[in-house]
Each structure stands twice: as structure tokens, then as C-alpha cells.
């Protein structure tokens, strides 16, 4: 039934920009609601509020649209439970006792048939090997080791020093390109953070909670409550980002907010 939102909006000859201005909801979020792409919207508490506000602004009963959203949440939870209940691997079948018994019997039978002369020869060979080993070991104890090579030690020490210098230079190069992000929640806030356009993280922070993140190039932030968070980018305070309950998008370091 979420298609009814777009249909009703077009009947009223309203644009998404006009609805966004009236409801204070981002145009991008309104478009996602119209298309039923609930998985790209913020957490449940914010999404329900967006749907309710949007529907009421164009004269549609919010319960009709919220019913679709609740069905989506129910299906999503069922899928997660099925994944968690699925075993990671199947246990290997235990060997049958009869097969083990036959294998054991076969080993015992082969030992009984082993010739006595061969066993005796094996013992004698082992004793001779031990004696030779002890003689060689005794000789090594009395051998005078050659004097250490002074040149080799100097080269080895220089190599170690050079390796330390190279590692320090690599660490310095890495630290020059790293971006740091420190976030402190003043109020309850949800946010989604994309690191270097690859890794995505979602957080729901309570007042007083803090997080620290690092990136090689950039951060993209989707903040559900701009007035409830304090952000330091590369140890620089970005100041007030918006009002309580306001949704804000930031690209760092491109944005200077």
C-alpha cells in the first residue's frame, strides 16, 4: 500500500521537495518510503515517525502504510532467525564399531605374523644408531667454535637499524593519510557511517557514549538526531550540526560543517 503515497501526492500536484519542506524530512527518505525500500531507511523508531508524518501531511491514514512496514519487519526478523538456527556444518558420521573392530583385528594379526629375526635386526640397528649419535654429539662438545665475524655482526646491526628506520617511515606515511573521527552522544542518536566508501557501520548511542573511528580517505555520515551528537574530525570540533530530531548527511573531509 506504500504506492498510495506517491499516487496521492501526484493527485495533490505536490513535489517531494514541497513535502520535504513541510514535514522537515529529507527528500531522499521520502522517496525511499514511496518505493518501499525500507532496508535503506534509519532504525524502526525514526522510520515509523517518517511514515506517519508523511501520510498525515497528504491526508492518508498512516496505519495503512505502517501495516506494510510491520510486515517487512516481521519477514526480516524471520529471515534472521532462520540464518541463526541453520547449522554451520554437518557433523561427520561416526565410524561403525564393526569396521573398527575388523581394522584392529587386522593390525594384531599382522604383528603376530611379523618374523622374529626381523624384529631382532631392527632392535640391533636402533642400538647402533644411538651409539653413533652419542659419539658424534660427544665430539661436537669438544670442538672449538670459530671466532665470530666482526664484519658480519656490524652489517647485521646496520641492517637492523635500517629496518627500524624503514618501519618508522612507513608508520609516519600511514599516519599522515589517516582521518580520525570522534563522536560523543549528548542525546539518544542513531547514525550510519560509511568508511572509505567501503565499510558501513550503524550505531545507536545513548547519552554519554563515545566512539572513535579511523579512515584512509573519508567518512560519510547519516545522522538521525543532529542536535544530539558532538563530532570531532581530526580533533577539530564541527560545532552544532542541527536541531534535535533533524536528519543530517555529512561527507568528511569535503564538508566544512
Image (cartoon, rainbow, N blue to C red):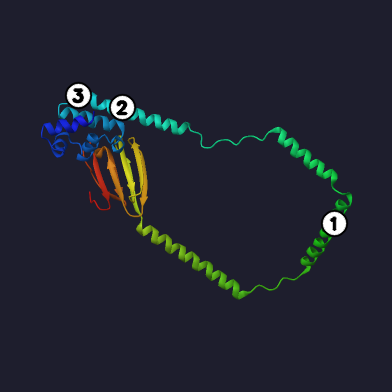
In x, y percent, where is residue 122? 84, 54
* Residue density around tag 2, few if under 14, some if 14–19, many if 20 or more, within 10 Å: some
**Of the pair 71 and 27, the residue shown nearer to us:** 71
- Dot placed on the residue nearer the N-terminal end, 3 or 2: 3
Q: CA distance from mark 3 to mark 2?
A: 15 Å
**Of the pair 146 and 253, the residue shown nearer to us:** 253
Direction bottom: furthest residue = 151
Q: Are marks 2 and 1 in contact (CB under 8 Å)?
A: no
In x, y percent, where is residue 113? 85, 45
Give the SS element for disc 3: loop
Residue, x 46% and y 33% (percent of image)?
84
Q: Quadrant of residue 230?
A: top left
In x, y percent, where is residue 49? 24, 30
Check residue 207 in the rendering and tell me which mark sits there, or answer none: none
Q: Quadrant of residue 170?
A: bottom left
Dot in front, 2 or 1? 2
In x, y percent, where is residue 235? 31, 51
Check residue 61 in the rendering and tell me which mark sits there, or answer none: 3
* Residue density around tag 3, few if under 14, some if 14–19, many if 20 or more, within 10 Å: few
Whether residue 72 can be seen here: yes
Give the SS element for disc 1: helix
Give the SS element for disc 2: helix
Instruction: State whether residue 47 is above or below residue 114.
Output: above
- Dot placed on the residue nearer the N-terminal end, 2 or 1: 2
**Of the pair 248 and 60, the residue shown nearer to us:** 60
Q: CA distance from mark 1 to mark 3?
A: 95 Å
Check residue 127 in the rendering and tell me which mark sits there, or answer none: 1
Check residue 70 in the rendering and tell me which mark sits there, or answer none: 2
Image quarter where the N terminus lies is top left
Residue, x 85% and y 43% (percent of image)?
112
Amino acid at each position: 500500500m506504500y504506492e498510495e503515497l506517491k499516487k496521492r501526492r501526484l493527485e495533490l500536484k505536490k513535489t517531494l521537495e514541497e513535502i520535504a519542506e513541510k514535514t522537515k524530512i529529507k527528500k531522499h527518505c521520502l522517496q525511499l518510503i514511496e518505493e518501499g525500500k525500507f532496508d535503506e531507511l534509519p532504525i524502526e523508531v525514526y522510520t515509523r515517525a517518517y511514515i506517519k508524518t508523511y501520510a498525515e501531511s497528504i491526508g492518508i491514514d498512516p496505519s495503512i502504510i505502517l501495516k506494510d512496514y510491520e510486515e517487512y519487519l516481521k519477514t526480516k526478523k524471520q529471515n534472521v532467525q532462520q540464518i541463526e538456527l541453520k547449522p554451520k556444518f554437518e557433523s561427520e558420521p561416526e565410524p561403525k564399531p564393526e569396521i573398527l573392530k575388523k581394522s584392529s583385528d587386522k593390525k594384531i594379526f599382522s604383528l603376530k605374523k611379523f618374523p622374529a629375526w626381523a624384529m631382532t635386526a631392527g632392535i640391533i640397528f636402533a642400538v647402533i644408531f644411538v651409539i653413533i649419535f652419542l659419539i658424534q654429539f660427544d665430539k661436537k662438545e669438544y670442538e672449538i667454535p670459530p671466532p665470530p665475524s666482526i664484519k658480519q655482526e656490524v652489517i647485521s646491526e646496520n641492517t637492523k637499524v635500517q629496518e627500524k628506520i624503514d618501519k618508522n617511515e612507513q608508520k609516519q606515511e600511514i599516519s599522515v593519510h589517516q582521518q580520525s573521527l570522534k563522536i560523543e552522544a549528548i542525546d539518544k542518536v542513531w547514525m550510519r557511517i560509511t568508511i572509505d566508501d567501503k565499510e558501513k557501520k550503524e550505531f545507536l548511542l545513548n547519552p554519554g557514549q563515545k566512539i572513535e573511528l579511523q579512515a584512509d580517505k573519508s567518512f560519510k555520515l547519516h545522522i538521525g538526531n543532529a542536535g544530539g551528537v558532538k563530532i570531532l574530525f581530526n580533533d577539530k570540533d564541527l560545532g552544532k550540526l542541527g536541531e534535535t530530531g533533524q536528519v543530517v548527511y555529512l561527507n568528511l573531509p569535503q564538508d566544512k560543517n
